[in-house]
Amino acid sequence: SKVKKYALFSCDKGFKLVGSRVRVCEKHGRQYRWDGSDATCLAINYCEQSLCFNDGSCTEEGDGYTCICPSGFTGDHCETDINDCSPDPCSPGGTCIDGVYSYTCVCKPGYTGDNCDIGIPTHFQNNDDIGKLIRMAQENILKRNEENKQARMQGKSVGSAEWIRQGQDTVNYAANRGLNTNLAKNVIIFIGDGMGLTTMSAARILRGQQLGGTGEEHQLSWDKFSHSMLAKTYSVNGQTPDSASTANAMLTGVKTSDYVIGVDEEVVPQMCDTVAGHEVDSILRWSKREGKAAGLITTTRPSHATPAAAFAHSPYRYWEGDHQVPESEETQCPDITKQLVVNNTDIEVILGGGRSYFMNENQEDPEYPLKSGFREDGRDLIQEWYDHKLSINQRPAYVWNISAFNEVDPANTDYLMGLFERKSMHNDADRISGDIAGEPSISEMTQKAIEILSKNENGFFLLVEGGLIDAEHHAGRAARALLETIALDRAVETAVNMTSENDTLILVTADHGHVMAFGGYSERGNPILGKTLSDAADGKPYTTLTY
């Protein structure tokens, strides 16, 4: 607010009266302060007199001055505190608390945002309300500090002996556990796309805080595994790899160049005539040769770089559909989705998104009637997949929504294809209320896949990709990336509970990391999605997680 305030007296413009007595009189039609004798007029600087209160800024203007008031104040001299809660900026999602300079909105359940104006999907409210989580963590800090204070006063703090005991228990468990030398009948590989060490550390804390703890002491499902290791992720031609070259290394054992799928380093990206003779097989194909069942699960698309490395051979990871392959290359290089259906007819379970890559451009999408498929060759690969299974006397099931997925009976299903979105699936926080038809969680897909694949007496191979961790990091959305990591954690826990160490090997890894940093000197239990407890060198606050 900008309010004009003029002087109560006037001499010639831009001048003031000099005298020891403060009186106002009129002389020659002008008002001025008078010292009892003839007045002398000199130049005045009004803004040197601190006329603007509450940090208002003063500006000379004509024969007076102007006070420019900071947020929250008004009046000629910025002397009046504004009621920032009138009109209510937090309605209807929150309650407004008036402050000295501004206001604070305390959000009601189901709302978030600075003004509590963003509705949270029901599933997110019930499980992952970030605002509630931060407030809960802050309350836990105060509660824990008080408890620790009382414990110290009563001589009941943890003490060094307890820490020593915990360390000894850990060492004794590792020393006495022994080695599992059994031959694995089943292999399950979980890949968190972009899930580097920083992401895992932050997700571990977030999950612990969701459960009401400080977070740091929490263990993700794979933290409890008996063995852990580190892996280098560079590709043949890249210091920083992409998901295609890393998936190639993990699933085939062969390092290759960025952007290529299921081939060695001799293949030149986007050049089909360099592929022949340089194809490499994956653990999925090795498993099928051993008579095992096989399955693919992803929250992206089956044709996405990570799952594609299990079955396809392509000089370019982005040739997922025929509409993306140059006409000059289509004969030599079938698109990745076509390779899945035509060349890999023996994969029992395929679950993820990517429906439009299987449908032609004349087909109406069942979930989005105004949308159609991507394919330009006129083929309906979903129907082709289904018809092929019937032709070999198998019992197939194709589903595209949560209700149909839930109705699938593993005991009476030999092959299952579930394509729940046109492109990638929804983020776990949005998959129920944010999706028209509903989608299963990555945990639910893992359970259904194991139930179907475990019917094979020879065992099975299952690849599960949490692909949206990477997508959310690319978008700079740390909270959602961590929620996707937690969703993967639940899927791993499901697999652990459904299988036995005696015959099943479970590997959890990542194809690469991301540039999310974890910094600051915050107290234990500080909200991992909040600010650090100290400011940066420039005096500004900053969040614990940054990019």
Image (cartoon, rainbow, N blue to C red):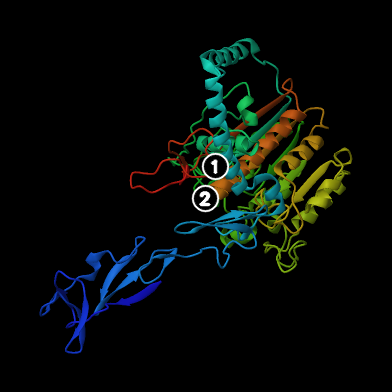
Please tell me how crowded label 2 is: few (under 14), some (14-19), or many (20+) other residues with Cα within 10 Å. some
Q: Mark 2 sits on what residue? A: 474
Q: Is residue 523 left or right of residue 180?
A: left
- Name the residue beneath numbered marker 1: 194
Residues at marks 2 and 1 touching, judged by CB atoms closer than 8 Å: yes
Q: Percent x, y for residue 485?
A: 61, 40
Q: Amino acid at mark 2?
A: His
The residue drawn where x is 71% and y is 35% is 462
The reply, left or right, for residue 102 in relation to residue 430 is left
- State left or right for residue 350 relative to residue 278: right
- Mark identifier at residue 517: none
Whole-percent x and y of residue 131? 59, 48
Q: Is residue 32 above or below residue 312?
A: below
- The residue closer to the viewer here, 235 or 82, is 82
Q: How many numbered markers are drawn?
A: 2
| Disc 1 residue crowd, few under 14, some 14–19, many 20+, Cα 10 Å | many
The answer to whether any part of residue 249 appears in the image is no
Position of the N terminus, as image quadrant, is: bottom left
Is residue 196 or residue 215 the one in the foreground?
Answer: 215
Q: Position of residue 194 (x, y in %)?
A: 54, 42
Front-most of residues 49 and 268: 49
- Amino acid identity at mark 1: Gly
Q: Is residue 424 above or below residue 45?
A: above
Q: Is residue 24 visible?
A: yes
Q: State the residue at coordinates (56%, 49%).
A: 472
Secondary structure of the residue carrying numbered label 1: loop
Q: Earlier in the sequence, mark 2 or mark 1?
A: 1
Q: Secondary structure at mark 2?
A: helix
Place residue 411 in its image quadrant.
top right
* In the image, residue 61 above or below residue 93: below
Counting from the top left corner in percent of width and height, residue 224 is at 63, 25
- Who is closer to the viewer here, 209 or 107? 107
